[in-house]
Amino acid sequence: MTEAAPLLLRAARGEQVERPPVWMMRQAGRYMKVYRDLRDRHPGFRERSENPDLSYEISMQPFHAFKPDGVILFSDILTPLPGMGINFDIIESQGPLIQDPIRNLAQVEALRALEPAESMPFVGEVLTRLRQSVGNEAAVLGFVGAPWTLAAYVVEGKSSKNYAVIKAMAFKEPELLHKLLDHFAESIATYLRFQIDSGAQVVQMFDSWAGQLSPMDYDSFAAPYQKKVVDLVKQTHPDTPFILYISGSAGVLERMAGTGVDIISLDWTVDMAEGLARLPEHIGVQGNVDPGLLFGTPAAIQARIDDTVRKARGRKHILNLGHGILPGTPEENGRAFFEAGKSVMERIGAAA
């Protein structure tokens, strides 16, 4: 049975594989003309992500175009919020807006426990269809936002440059923030279990804003809740590989390894060899090509992939960018990334 499993799933489990699997964060999105055309017909982000036919179609667009080794659900980290009683919208060119930011105890206590099968049945439907469609040609990935990042959005009410509102809560009313974070940890674990039961074979947690915390505050407000999500999911789904990504994580890499995740997704500000030297042998890595490199030449993309894979060889490694692919990236350079990733062993040799 294992031999028939998708390459990315085998690699994520730590099995010997013929080459590192390759996919890209945000691989379905604005850099693809087919996506922009669909967006023009369906301008609302929540419609695109919550209509199962549209979400499925968008999720499959990069698979049809490039055959990546992973197909990730097209959704958003904020998608579970309405199921907890928090409404939001995503405005093109502005980002997320929380209609009633959470600032007091009454609001936290009014939050509902998440029942994803009731509030987000479309997510389960899309994951099931993706699994049926790609078979063993690719692994199906699910994902969530981590408790700190979700809390940052709902407390700030929108994207932030300085995180002043949530940091004020952290340092003035820490008990209130811990109560909110704990609620999110429970709900996010429930959501991930639902995704896995629906067809996700590998899951990734994005703590996009945890890189804005000092190491001391990461230990208080991010890591314990990352770990709680991981522990709860591993209780029921111990064999599902779990990836953690933090943008700007150079200062907390060793701390990330203590959360119980299987794979740490490195951003591009850490050299691959140095990042691996800072992580225990049993922890795998994902990444970490600078997405800005995809504005360069195919030769430059290939050379950087070769360097990244060379440095990671001998360790569990999933080739990816160090952040999501950027809007405006030439689509042919996305193709060059996948092609170079799939052929990398032919250039650098299979010997370890």
Image (spheres, rainbow, N blue to C red):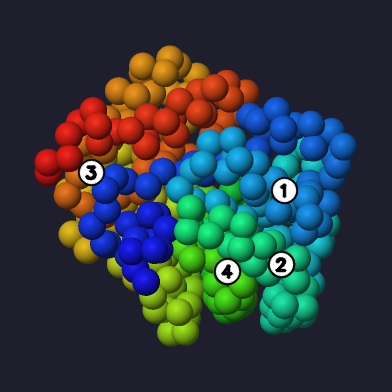
Instruction: Measure the alpha-carbon separation of dots 4 and 1.
Output: 16 Å
Name the element at disc 4. Answer: loop
The answer for how far apart the CA atoms under marks 4 and 2 are is: 9 Å
Per the image, the residue denoted by label 4 is 199
Q: What residue type is labelled 1?
A: Glu
Q: Distance between the residues labelled 3 and 1?
A: 33 Å
- N-terminal label among 1 and 2: 1
Circle 1 residues within 10 Å: few <14, some 14–19, many ≥20: some
Query: Quarter of the image containing the N terminus?
Result: bottom left
Say few, some or many: other residues with alpha carbon within 10 Å of mark 4 (under 14 / 14 to 19 / 20 or more): many
Asked which secondary structure carries label 1, the reply is helix
Q: What is the quadrant of the C terminus in the image? A: top left
Residue 224 position (above or below residue 33): below
Name the N-terminal-most of marks 3 and 4.
4
Which residue in the structure is indicated by mark 3? 312
Pointer 2: residues within 10 angstroms few (<14), some, or many (20+)? some
Q: Earlier in the sequence, mark 4 or mark 1?
A: 1
Q: On residue 57, which mark appears?
A: 1
The amino acid on which the numbered mark 2 sits, given as a three-letter code, is Glu
Residue 221 visible in rendering: no
Of 68 and 306, nearer the camera is 68
* Distance CA(mark 3)–CA(mark 4): 29 Å
For the residues carrying marks 3 and 4, which lies nearer the camera in this image?
4
* SS under mark 2: helix
Residue matched to label 2? 125
Quarter of the image holding residue 284?
Answer: bottom left
